[in-house]
Amino acid sequence: MGILEASRTVEIDAPKSKCYEIISDLASTPDWQESMNSLDVLETDSEGRPSLVEIKSDAKVREVSSRVAFEYQPEDGMTWEQKKGDLKWMKGSWTLEDLGDGRTRATYALKGDTGRMLGLLIKGPVQDKLKEWLTKDAADGLKARAESA
């Protein structure tokens, strides 16, 4: 059993509303988050937003699949929880803070249990590299997307 927990915070030269617009457009996430190979929307909520998706991600040692449920906190971020997948369990979040002057602080966080099999592959330096890869990719990807738009 290997608990994988990591977060990364970036400051973005773009308003909070723009950052939220980007993170809540789940279908476009593979365009700016390099570690995400694909995302398929399986269900939507009453507002037409994706609420359950199938994600295939590059975990460096192999591709992992997750069926993930999302909850939205408009303008402030979003949370998600794996319902089925290669990891034993996983939860994550985006938190957005308005810094004023059109700037935003965005924090990407995740926590999960890799389970026994993946845990054997993802340990020590490999785990550290994976945590950096996943969080840096998401946070820096959002920053680049928001500041270029």
Image: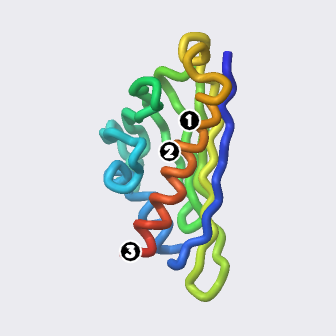
In the figure, 18 relative to 130: above or below?
below
- Categorize mark 1 by other alpha carbons within 10 Å: few (<14), some (14-19), many (20+): some
Q: Amino acid at mark 2?
A: Phe
In the figure, 129 relative to 76: above or below?
above
The structure residue drawn at horizontal position 39% and vertical position 47%, both measured from the top left corner, is 34
The way the protein has been coloured in the rendering is: rainbow
Q: Nearer the viewer, mark 3 or mark 1?
A: 1
| Mark found first going from the N terminus, 3 or 1 | 1
Could you tell me which secondary element the residue under label 1 belongs to? Answer: helix
Residue 16: quarter of image: bottom right
Q: The C terminus is located in which quarter?
A: bottom left
Depth order, front residue of 39/30: 30
In the figure, 56 relative to 80: above or below?
above
Tag 1 residue:
130
Could you tell me which secondary element the residue under label 2 belongs to? Answer: strand
Tag 2 residue:
70
Depth order, front residue of 99/147: 147
Q: Where is residue 49 drawn, in percent x and y?
A: 39, 53
- Image side of residue 108 versus residue 137, left or right: right
Q: Where is residue 144 drawn, in percent x and y?
A: 44, 66
| Mark found first going from the N terminus, 3 or 2 | 2
Residue 124: quarter of image: top right
